[in-house]
Amino acid sequence: MEKDSNPIRHDKPAMVIHRSAGFSLVELTMVVAIVAIVSAIAVPRLSNATVRYQLDAAARRLAGDIEYAQQEAIASSSSRTLTFNFLGMSYTITKRDSSGNASVVSVISLNDGPYRASSLTASIAGNTSTPIIFDGFGKPNGAGTIQLKLGAETRIITMDGITGRLSVR
């Protein structure tokens, strides 16, 4: 008895399936329409997200610098002052030495990148021109609110007048 060199036997003839490679015009049109709809929804949301992220970053930076000034006042037992420049969209942190001389610690601009805030307002102890002053114990000179704007978005930083604790909303 002779063995076949190929142990697999095909008793039925192979069926040939003809299918064209590619997409029909209807399928291609549907895909393009879906991509256009998704893009029309996503692009405005993406641009709004950028504005929100920039404003959140500016608010976090400002809140962090206020907390830093308070901690430095406590650590050095000397006052720290945070003065706002509303037209220049910036603020300056200064310290006083034991003889009362003021020196600038840092100047931060909120209208430059990455923040690009368009409006800065503050009211400390009921006055818009009063700076935030932390005494040597870290106590602020009063309660206050600071408002940052970029486009239609707004962030408000609220400071407690006794503890100096901040909240950002």
Image (cartoon, grey):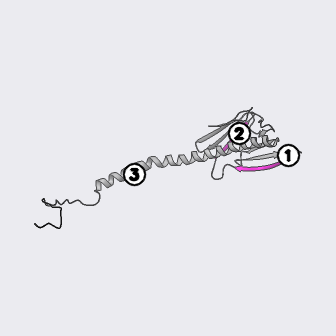
Query: Going 68% across and 42% down the picture, which residue do you hit?
Result: 63
Which residue is under mark 3? 35
Amino acid on which the number 3 mark rests in the picture: Val
Q: Position of residue 168 (x, y in %)?
A: 64, 38
Q: Amino acid at mark 2?
A: Ala
Q: Which residue reaches farthest front?
A: 1
Instruction: Identify residue for label 1.
Output: 97
Which numbered tag is attached to residue 111? none
Q: Is residue 120 left or right of residue 101?
A: left
**Alpha carbon of mark 1 to alpha carbon of mark 3: how far?**
63 Å
Q: Nearer the viewer, residue 34 or 105?
A: 105
Q: Is residue 47 above or below residue 139?
A: below
Q: CA distance from mark 2 to mark 3?
A: 45 Å
Q: CA distance from mark 1 to mark 2?
A: 26 Å
Q: Upstream in the sequence, badge 1 or badge 3?
A: 3
Q: Quadrant of residue 8?
A: bottom left
Amino acid type at image mark 1: Asp
Q: Which residues are magenta?
A: 102-123
Q: Kindly identify the residue that appears in the image at 70 percent across and 35 percent down.
A: 165
Which comes before the other along the chain, label 1 or label 2? 1
What x and y, as percent, mark residue 52? 57, 45
- Local secondary structure at mark 2: strand
Residue located beneath label 2 in the image: 122
Count numbered badges in the picture: 3
Q: Secondary structure at mark 3?
A: helix
Left or right, 129 with respect to 48, comes to right
Q: Position of residue 133 (x, y in %)?
A: 78, 39
> Label 2 near label 1: C-beta < 8 Å?
no
